[in-house]
Amino acid sequence: MEVQGRIKMIDETKTYGNNGFRKRELVVTTEEQYPQHILVEFVQDKCDLLNSYKVGQMVKVSINLRGREWVNPQGETKYFNSIQGWRIENLEQAQPEGGMPPVPPMEAFEPADDISDEDHDDLPF
């Protein structure tokens, strides 16, 4: 599965427990009629995938849905879901300085000189 949108937040890598479990969170805001803020977890070696990304970038994140069952001390069963990322791709093209593609100078365009009045087009308008 994939989630596509703009990076809203990238958290620092956090380490838990004695075993060195690492987790890093990313929030991606989808661009649709009703934007969604999707929290995606990257764990262990996947945390480093986020190092080259910044807030505001358009990305596509490959994800897995994870579900867990937990029984509390009172014997009640609870269920938890998480979204884990395993790949991230930048969707923005490298733009030249100024953010706009270069425009060729007007002298690069020359009018056609081989058109005659006898030529007609068959366009319906």
Image (cartoon, rainbow, N blue to C red):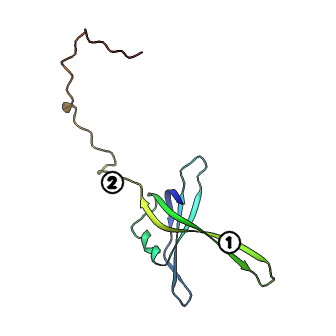
Q: Amino acid at mark 2?
A: Ala
Q: Which badge, 1 or 2, is on the more N-terminal residue?
A: 1
Q: Are marks 1 and 2 in contact (CB under 8 Å)?
A: no
Which quarter shows the N terminus? bottom right
Q: Which mark is residue 94?
A: 2
Does residue 9 sit above or below 114 in this rendering?
Answer: below
Does residue 4 sit above or below 10 in this rendering?
Answer: above
- Secondary structure at numbered mark 2: loop
**Along the line of sight, the residue nearer the viewer: 99 or 31:** 31
Q: Residue at x 42, y 61 (%)?
A: 89
**Along the line of sight, the residue nearer the viewer: 67 or 94:** 67
52 lies left or right of 64 = left
79 lies left or right of 20 = right
Does residue 45 sit above or below 104 in this rendering?
Answer: below
- The Cα atoms of the two marked residues, 1 and 2, are separated by 39 Å
Q: Residues within 10 Å of mark 1 (few under 14, many from 20)?
A: few
Q: Which residue is mark 1?
A: 80
